[in-house]
Image: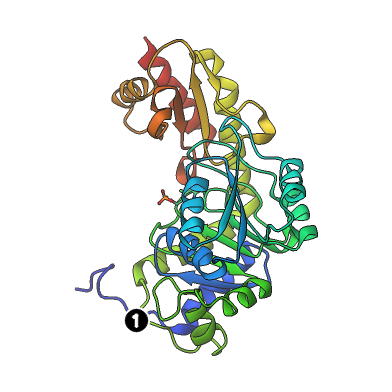
């Protein structure tokens, strides 16, 4: 008897390329899309190491924990890093990015997280992209948490390196990820003597041996199960319609925001326009401890997608991870009901 996970025909180059094309359609991009054989941290790190070095001046926008990580990689690459940190209850503005360029015209790289599942905010990428393009800098975007929950449009927004993963709003696997790469970003990598080459982190290897070679032969055996899961998840999004998948996330987010007050909590992100559709964060205001409240809520209903904030936020932040299969008003209401039960 054949096993559904184990006794599979090999996943060939043509199938792999067709999955890349599906990702390109999802992002409405004409840039090269490379599917990387690892979790999103692989292209996130590979893209920074490929395009930056001691000559780089990077504006690193910090609106949550991932911005911190990117700053560490950038410094590790020898780049001069200008951190622009904004409080987690808000979003960065295009005006703040413009001011940073005015103070440091030498900035030639901007790293930004689109939506932060960990802090529940989302940033106005289209407006920021206009500023970055005016200044001619390379624009790097982590869209792992936004794709599927809100529009992600690298071409329209002038994003040079747009990284996505399927494990959040796409409702797909975590083990493979993708990056769209502009011509300018490829040129920056090709000119960078420190860009990884002959390395698992290397995007240039994929450019030279896969993209430029007509996508005929893979560099190594692909992560077959994850690739099939990614293909299935793209098919499901196409069948449901990306707009309806995004609408489900928005509706779930609104239901949590609107229902928070009734269970004694308030939205952590103050303005609706700054709140990410992928996940909603709530603030505990009355001296109760968020992590303890979440533990009691999960004891009351183990099926709800609740978590406490990470690190220092564990005392005051509750995350409702209403993404993927949990992106529904019903799950949003159930999550609030569990928090209500926990409070009693
Ligand atoms: C979830 C997420 C990632 C991927 O990290 P995992 O914790 O491994 O899922 C990357 N960037 C952002 C902004 C994310 O929210």
Residue drawn 63% across and 25% down?
A: 270
Q: Tell me how many marks there are.
A: 1
- Relative height, residue 327 to residue 268 (above, below): below
Of all residues, the one furthest to the right in this rendering is 134
Image quarter where the N terminus lies is bottom left
Mark 1, Cα crowd under 10 Å, few <14 / some 14-19 / many 20+, is few
In front of the other: 264 or 234: 264
The location of residue 72, given as percent across then percent down, is 46, 52
The location of residue 176, given as percent across then percent down, is 42, 64
Of all residues, the one furthest to the left in this rendering is 1
Colouring method of the image: rainbow
The location of residue 81, given as percent across then percent down, is 57, 53
Say whether residue 252 is visible: yes
- Relative height, residue 307 to residue 33 (above, below): above
Say whether residue 165 is visible: no
Q: Which residue is mark 1?
A: 10
Residue drawn 47% across and 66% down?
A: 46
Residue drawn 67% across and 61% down?
A: 108
Image quarter where the C terminus lies is top left
């Amino acid at each position: 008897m054949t096993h559904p996970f184990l006794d599979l025909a090999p996943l060939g180059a043509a199938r792999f390329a067709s999955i890349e094309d599906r990702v390109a359609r999802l992002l409405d991009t004409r840039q090269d899309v490379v599917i990387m054989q690892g979790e999103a941290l692989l292209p996130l790190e590979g893209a920074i190491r490929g395009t930056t070095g001691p000559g780089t001046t990077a504006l690193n926008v910090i609106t949550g924990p991932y911005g911190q990580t990117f700053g560490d990689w950038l410094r590790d690459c020898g780049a001069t890093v200008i951190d622009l940190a904004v409080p987690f209850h808000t979003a960065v503005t295009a005006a703040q990015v413009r001011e940073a360029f005015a103070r440091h015209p030498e900035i030639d790289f901007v790293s930004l997280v689109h939506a932060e599942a960990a802090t529940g905010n989302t940033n106005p990428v289209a407006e920021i992209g206009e500023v970055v393009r005016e200044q001619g800098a390379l624009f790097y975007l982590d869209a792992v948490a936004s794709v599927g929950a809100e529009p992600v449009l690298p071409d329209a927004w002038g994003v040079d390196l747009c990284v996505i993963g399927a494990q959040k709003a796409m409702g797909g696997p975590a083990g493979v990820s993708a990056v769209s790469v502009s011509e300018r970003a490829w040129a920056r990598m090709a000119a960078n003597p420190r860009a990884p080459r002959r390395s698992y982190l290397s995007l240039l290897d994929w450019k030279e041996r896969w993209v430029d070679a007509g996508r005929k032969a893979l560099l190594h055996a692909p992560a077959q199960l994850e690739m099939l899961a990614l293909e299935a998840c793209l098919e499901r999004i196409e069948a449901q319609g990306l707009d309806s998948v995004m609408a489900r996330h928005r509706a779930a987010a609104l239901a949590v925001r609107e229902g928070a007050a009734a269970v004694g909590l308030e939205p952590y992100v103050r303005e609706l326009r700054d709140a990410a559709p992928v996940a909603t964060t709530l603030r505990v205001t009355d001296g109760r401890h968020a992590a303890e409240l979440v533990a009691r809520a999960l004891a009351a209903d183990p099926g709800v997608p609740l978590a406490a904030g990470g690190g220092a936020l564990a005392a005051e932040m509750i995350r409702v991870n209403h993404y993927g299969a949990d992106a529904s008003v019903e799950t949003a209401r159930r999550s609030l009901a569990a928090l209500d039960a926990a409070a009693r």
